[in-house]
Amino acid sequence: MKRLFISVAAILCMAATASAQTLIVVEEKPVLTNKKGAPILPQAGDVSIGISTPPFFSYLGNMFTRDGSNTAPTFNSLGAGLNMKFFTADNQAIRAGLNVNFGTDYYYGNPTSNTVAGATVTDRMEKSNQGFGINIGYEWRRGYGRLQGFYGAQLAASYNNVTTHYKYGNEMNATYPTPWSWDFNTGSQAQMAERMIDVKGAPIISVGLFGFVGVEYFFAPKMSIGGEIGLGVAYVNQGESEYTGQYFDTASNSVKENTVKRHDSTTPTNGFNVRTAAQGNIFLSFYF
């Protein structure tokens, strides 16, 4: 009887040991590497830096337009995007982004001179952009080989404003109360009784929640190119635009200014508005 008890106890101990060993065995997912053994895909703990590249792809595409209306990409007029990610797991990441759009564009016109026969003067319009956007979110990833898909959600906020200033070559005075001036809207000259000198655009502030989906291809270890699109709902607040013009007042025999504040007809009224909004970009990313 004693021998039987010892035998049963020994069998139970062996079964328990085998069971414990089975519980601690973890099947490791094979890591995709290149011929030199370097990991290709991001792993838990990696950090990425991405650069949004819509300006450059737009420039390449516009090279084939018939009218030749293509300009070299500049971060001043088109904006730049910087994105960062921290991988909490091989297939999950916290993400954040910053987009900026600050710069000034200049436009010129050459109306007839008021004082010199047969000559022209130069009028200039300066259009300045001030804008930025930030976002933070979370993404999940899956895929096969070098091609990876991702999806997730993010919070985004942005601010944008445009101001315009005009400088004229012909002075407005008692001798020339309607000087020749360049109309930048029509692209031609006109004798203006009142002409614009400053436009302070309505500032636009928005906050929204967006879902996104995209694909990413790793063409080298920890280097990729990809694209994503998103759709969400945003709260948008837009203020008033301020228009300042100048005219010659015959009663006082002097040049005066007139300022008007209003909501542009093509923009929403003041207050908060709910909109659906689409997003999209192409990016180049590096992982460390």
Image: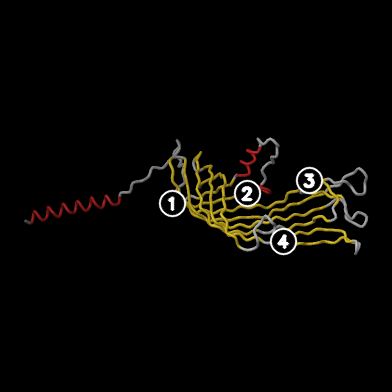
Ranked by sequence position, the earlier of labels 4 and 3 is: 3
* Vertical arrangement, residue 156 with respect to residue 186, above or below: below
Q: Amino acid at mark 2?
A: Ala
Q: Secondary structure at mark 4?
A: strand
Ranked by sequence position, the earlier of labels 1 and 3 is: 1
> Cα distance, mark 1 to mark 3?
57 Å
Q: Amino acid at mark 3?
A: Gly
Q: Mark 1 and mark 2 in contact (Cβ < 8 Å)?
A: no
Q: Nearer the viewer, mark 2 or mark 3?
A: 3
Q: Secondary structure at mark 1?
A: strand
Ranked by sequence position, the earlier of labels 2 and 3 is: 2
Q: Nearer the viewer, mark 4 or mark 2?
A: 4
> Cα distance, mark 4 to mark 2?
31 Å
Q: Which residue is mark 4?
A: 262
Determine which of the numbered discs, if any, sits on residue 80 in the image: 2
The type of colouring in the image is secondary structure
Q: Quadrant of residue 162?
A: bottom right
Q: Which residue is mark 1?
A: 89
Determine whether, in the image, residue 140 is placed left or right of residue 73. left
Residue 217 position in % (x across, y down): 50, 41
Q: Quadrant of the N terminus?
A: bottom left
Determine which of the numbered discs, if any, sits on residue 187 in the image: 3
User: In the rendered picture of this protein, how many numbered marks are placed on residues?
Assistant: 4
Q: Secondary structure at mark 3?
A: loop
* Label 3: few (<14), some (14–19) or many (≥20) C-alpha neighbours in 10 Å: few
Q: Secondary structure at mark 2?
A: strand
> Cα distance, mark 2 to mark 1?
28 Å
